[in-house]
Image (tube, rainbow, N blue to C red):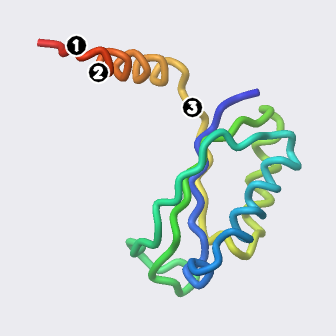
Amino acid sequence: MREYELTVLIHPDLEADIEPALKKVREIVASNKGTVKKEDNWGKKRLQYKIGGEEFAVYVYMEIELPAEANAKVQSTLNITDEVLRYLLVSVDEKIRALKEAEDSKESEGETEE
């Protein structure tokens, strides 16, 4: 299993009842033998440019685990999902994650670099 970061831009009209759209994204991941480890709703934000005539979107960030061969299948399914305006699926670099975790542990211990 590989770790990925998935950021999904959900149609702004679904903001009031976003749970069915998020459930659909979670099911896409699960149907490809993946799991959602973390989910963070960043809320409705203005887009830099219109996507499908929309000026806003609801941003949702997820940390997921997927088998390597499921990556393309998840992307192709997200491409045809009506609730999703855009998405970004990137693999997590293990070296950067280890470095970040080391920094976080130093901060929690109260150490600072000078």
Left or right relative to 105: residue 90: right
Residue at which label 2 appears? 107
Q: Regarding mark 3 in the picture, which secondary structure is present there?
A: loop
Mark number for residue 92? 3
Cα distance in 3D space between marks 3 and 1: 26 Å
- Residue drawn at 63 percent across, 38 percent down: 4
Q: Are marks 2 and 1 in contact (CB under 8 Å)?
A: yes
Mark number for residue 111? 1
Residue pushed farthest front? 109
Q: Classify 10 Å Cα crowding around label 2: few (below 14), some (14-19), many (20 and above).
A: few
Quarter location, residue 83:
bottom right
Q: Quadrant of the N terminus?
A: top right
Residue 6 or residue 21, whichever sits in front: 21
Cα distance in 3D space between marks 3 and 2: 22 Å
Left or right relative to 21: residue 41: left
Number of numbered callouts drawn: 3
- Residue drawn at 78 percent across, 32 percent down: 68
- Residue drawn at 81 percent across, 55 percent down: 28
Q: Amino acid at mark 3?
A: Val
Residue 25 lies, in percent from the top left, at 74, 59
Above or below: residue 71 compared with residue 9? above
Residue 94 lies, in percent from the top left, at 55, 21
Label 3 or label 2, whichever lies nearer to me, is 2
Q: Amino acid at mark 2?
A: Glu
Q: Quadrant of the C terminus?
A: top left
Mark number for residue 96? none
Q: Regarding mark 1 in the picture, which secondary structure is present there?
A: loop
